Image: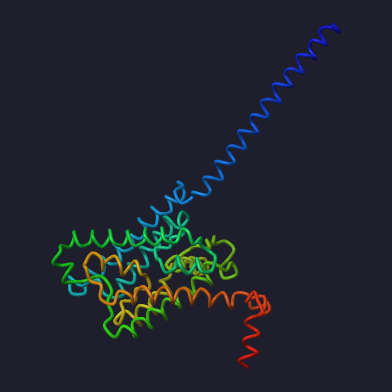
Amino acid sequence: MAGREDGGGGTGAMEEGRDAGRQAGDESSEDGGGGSDRCSSGSDMISVQFMQKIIAEILGTYFMIFAGCGSVVVNLSTAGTVTFPGICAVWGLVVMVLVYSVGHISGAHFNPAVTVAFATCGRFPWKQVPSYAVAQVLGSTLASLTLRVVFGGATAREHFFGTAPSGSDAQAVALEFVISFYLMFVVSGVATDNRAVTTDITVDPSVSVRSTELMLWRSCSRRSGNWLGSPLAPPSCSTCWPITGASMNPARTLGPAIVAGRYKSIWVYVVGPVCGTVAGAWAYNLVRFTDKPLREITKSGSFLRSARITG
């Protein structure tokens, strides 16, 4: 029995040795796996999750432009049967549906200006900005091409569904800057500040301009029980639509322009919205923490020193 017990102990020692060897192998394989994880994290630009985001942005921008610009070309080709309020409703409703569809996947930006604005505030990685912008412009271009094929080349040329300033370029840039600033300021308050919405609404910090409209709709519907119209689109569109087309989105302008080959004053719809959204995002950041000292908001004393010098 003692011999058996000793033998059993030897067998146990051998088994322990094998177990230790297996554990060492497992640890080495885990280390190798960690190395591969590090490599994959370094190449996350081609990961499956990131590609899903890009596809979501392409499809979301495609359907947004197809429905929104489609309502414009139908209104132009049918002597105004859709009407201006109808066009606003189409844009708002299609965005609402798309936010529900892909907002949890990509953040539902659909707008390069919004993507850049979030990146400047550190709420979106800079390395993903070019891919998002290309995806958004690609989706807009494909949608514009589809509209041209569906409604015919002659109709598309006669009834341009893109945006072009009816006044001067300086006037158009100023208007696009102001309305983009206004929209991004509201976006930053509603979509990135948890104090601005009720606790039962999930807020994604990378949600886009149009997504904010949905958040406001949802917030109001929780209180009143009714779905309300977009509080953001009517003021912007009614003020600037006759002058600039109220683009607020470089992709919305670039897609139809590429298909139609009309690039007159195209820079207006890149500079205006991008500068406006960036300024709007940073303007809200300045008032986000009003209960904290100015030195803490600015993160340095340079602002105070310059204020004293100028004073």
Q: Which is more toward the observer, 183 or 201?
A: 183
Q: How many marks?
A: 0
Q: Is residue 241 above or below residue 45?
A: below
Q: Colour mode? A: rainbow
Q: Is residue 41 above or below residue 307?
A: above
* 295 displayed left or right of 161: right
- Can you say which quadrant of the picture contains the N terminus? top right
Q: Is residue 116 above or below residue 50?
A: below
Residue shown at 39% from the left, 59% from the top = 98
Residue shown at 35% from the left, 60% from the top = 61
Residue 240 on image: x %, y %: 34, 81
- Can you say which quadrant of the picture contains the C terminus? bottom right
Residue shown at 45% from the left, 77% from the top = 181
Q: Is residue 125 above or below residue 188?
A: above
Q: Which is more toward the observer, 271 or 92?
A: 271
Q: Which is more toward the observer, 184 or 92?
A: 184
* 63 displayed left or right of 310: left
* 6 displayed left or right of 261: right
Residue shown at 65% from the left, 33% from the top = 27
Residue 121 on image: x %, y %: 53, 69
Residue 200 on image: x %, y %: 57, 61
Q: Quadrant of residue 271?
A: bottom left
Instruction: Residue at the far bottom: name it.
Output: 311
Residue 198 on image: x %, y %: 57, 66
Q: Quadrant of residue 196?
A: bottom right
